[in-house]
Image (cartoon, rainbow, N blue to C red):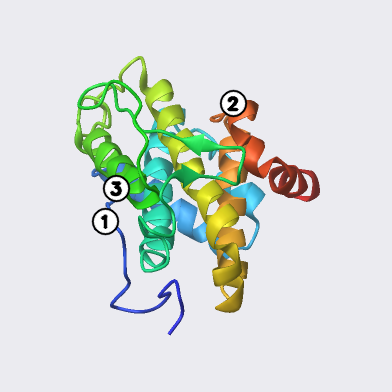
Amino acid sequence: MSLFGLGSKNQKTFRPKKNAPSGNKGVQLKKHIDATLGSGNLRDAVRLPPGEDLNEWLAVNTVDFFNQVNILYGTLMEFCTPTTCPTMSAGPKFEYRWADGVQIKKPIEVSAPKYVEYLMDWIEVQLDDESIFPQKLGTPFPQNFREVVKTIFKRLFRVYAHIYHSHFQKIVSLKEEAHLNTCFKHFTLFTWEFKLIDKAELAPLIDLIESIVSVC
């Protein structure tokens, strides 16, 4: 069975998959993403479709990337444990501590799986909050919407950084690196296109990122 369960009805996810924002617009944009991804040109797939609202595009893609990371991390859970990964790190130079500003205001050191659990819980709260991610067509997005999206993407990047630094050899041994690389390439091109992650945050994978954006 494929590590990432592609094509399987029993696809393992860390959290249940989220649907695109409801209303015809969200569904149409999700179909556009799927169609352009099918063409194989990831650069085209991330661009804002002509005439579409930027916030709508960011919202649908945020849900999509949340689901992608869910699947990727969910299939690594047996390898990423509090014993193997006692801190949420990306190599020896980068360690991430968790704080959400509400339940946990002061950053705390936690294991990688606990960090990802906190993160996915936190993202789900944002996605389910209709004052942040409106479900009804025509409902305005909040003024700070882009900042919320940037924080989500910054933290999702940390999961990729941890996977590459701590679990890549396991993925290679399972011959699944091509799928991981494609997912990360899509993620990178999207965040680059809309300037969603500050360059300093990208340091753990900057060489890989620069190779992606320079050749694409």
Which residue is farthest bottom? 1
Residue 174 vertical placement versus 136 (above, below): below
Amino acid type, callout 2 = Asp
Which residue is farthest right? 215
Secondary structure beneath label 3 = helix
Q: Looking at the image, is mark 2 or mark 3 earlier in the sequence? A: 3
User: Are the residues at dot 2 and dot 1 in contact (C-beta closer than 8 Å)?
Assistant: no
Amino acid type, callout 1 = Arg
Q: Which residue is mark 2?
A: 198
Q: Quadrant of residue 166?
A: bottom right
In-image side of 168 versus 5 (left or right):
right
Q: Which residue is mark 3?
A: 117
Q: CA distance from mark 2 to mark 3?
A: 24 Å
Q: CA distance from mark 2 to mark 1?
A: 27 Å
From the viewer's perspective, is the residue at label 2 or at label 3 nearer? Answer: 3
Residue 137 place in picture, x, y as percent:
25, 34
Q: CA distance from mark 1 to mark 3?
A: 9 Å
Q: Quadrant of the N terminus?
A: bottom left
Residue 109 vertical placement versus 79 (above, below): above
From the viewer's perspective, is the residue at label 1 or at label 3 nearer? Answer: 3
Secondary structure beneath label 2 = loop
Secondary structure beneath label 1 = loop
Q: Nearer the viewer, residue 141 or 147?
A: 147
Amino acid type, callout 3 = Glu
Instruction: Sort mark 1 into few (<14), some (14-19) or many (20+) by Cα contacts within 10 Å.
Output: some
Residue 162 place in picture, x, y as percent:
52, 50
Q: Looking at the image, is mark 2 or mark 1 earlier in the sequence? A: 1
Residue 94 vertical placement versus 163 (above, below): above
Q: Residue at x 30, y 59 (%)?
A: 14
